[in-house]
Image (cartoon, grey):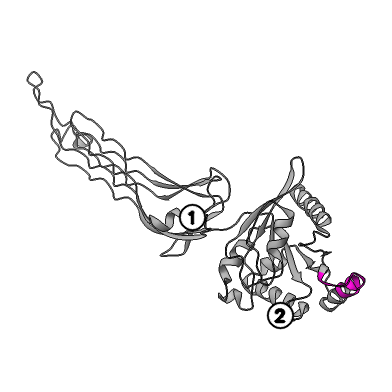
Amino acid sequence: MKFVDEAKIYVEAGKGGNGACSFLRLKFVPLGGPDGGNGGDGGSVFLQADESINTLVDYRYIRTYRAEHGEKGGSRDCTGKSGQDLILRVPVGTVVYDSDTDELIADLTEAKQIACVAKGGRHGIGNASFKSSINRSPRRTIPGQEGEKRNLRLELKVLADVGLVGMPNAGKSTLISAMSAARPKVADYPFTTLYPYLGVVRISHFRSFIIADLPGLIEGAAEGAGLGIRFLKHVARTRLLYHVVDVVPADESDPVDNIHAITKELEKYSGDLLAKERWLVLNKIDMLPPGEVEAYCQNIIKQLHWEGRVFVISGLAKLGLDELAQETMRYLEEQGKE
C-alpha cells in the first residue's frame, strides 16, 4: 500500500436540536401548561489512533466528514435524540493541526488515544423549561447551537526507535532489509525510498526494536529540496539515529563532505535533531580491499573529529550487523530505564 503521510480534511460537528414550543392539551386535563422538551446535543467528531492502520490514504479520497445533528425536542417534555458522534480512525503517530490557524490540536502517539477535533452543538431549550409562577404559558424557546467546523491537516510521523539518515544511495534500504524482515525497494538511482519503511529487528524472545528506512537527504532539504521536510519530520520521533555513509560513493564524492552536508541539514531543521544520539555507520566496506578497511575508516573519523560511536559494516555482505543490532538494543533498553 502506498504510504501517505499528509492529508487535509474538513470536519463538521452536528448542530444541536431546537427546543420545542408545545402546550399540553388533553380532554380531562384543563390548563395543562407548556410541555415543550429540549433538543438533543449535536454529535462531535473524534480522531482515534488505531495501530492496524499505517497510512492516511483514505483521507485523500474522502475529505468531508459530518457528525449527526441533534433532533428537535418534542411535546410532553420529550427530549430530542442526540446526534451520534463520528469517530475517524487514523494511524498511531498522527499529528492534527487546524489548517487555517496552524494550531496543534492533537498528537496521537499511542494506540486507542482519542481526541475531539470538532465539538457538537449544545441542545436547544424547550418552552417547558421557562414556566414559572408568573409566566405560566411561556412561548420562549432557545434554538440549538451550531457544531464546530474545522479544516484539518493530518500529518503522520513515523514512530520508530531508530531512524536512518544519509545521502541517497548510502545503502539505507539494503541495511534495513538485511537487519529486519522489511523489503524496501533497492536500486542505484536517487530517491529509491520515496516513503518510510518500518522494519522490526528481533534480537531475542521479547527483545526487538523498530527501525525506519527514510527517504535520503540532499543539500537544501531543510528548505524543502528533494523530499525535504517530508523526510525530516519523521526523524523527530526516533530515539536514535544511524548516520549511514557510503565509504566509496559511486559519484566519487568525498564521504566526509557528505557527512557534513547531512549534519548541516539536521541542524537547520531543528537543534533538537542535532542533539539526538547519532551513530556513524560506515557502510559498503566490502567495496574496499580487506587490508585497507581499517586505515580508510580511521582516516574518515579523524577528519570528522567524530566523538560518538562508530560502526563499520556492509549491509549487502551482512558484515558487522549483529554487533550493531546488539549495541542498539542495549542502548534503547538503558534509555528506557532512565
Q: Residue at x 60, y 74 (%)?
A: 222
Q: Residue at x 81, y 76 (%)?
A: 304
Label 2 sits on residue: 251
Badge 1 element? loop
Badge 2 element? loop
Q: Nearer the viewer, residue 104 or 259?
A: 259
Q: Residue at x 8, y 22 (%)?
A: 30
Which quadrant holds residue 285?
bottom right
Residue 321: percent from the left, percent from the top? 80, 57
Q: Nearer the viewer, residue 134 or 280?
A: 280
Check residue 294 for magenta coloring.
yes
Label 1 sits on residue: 56
The residue furthest left is 27
Residue type marked 1:
Leu
Read off the magenta span.
287-297
Q: Nearer the viewer, residue 222 or 118?
A: 222
Residue type marked 2:
Asp
Q: Earlier in the sequence, mark 1 or mark 2?
A: 1
Residue 231: percent from the left, percent from the top? 60, 66
Q: Is residue 240 visible?
A: no
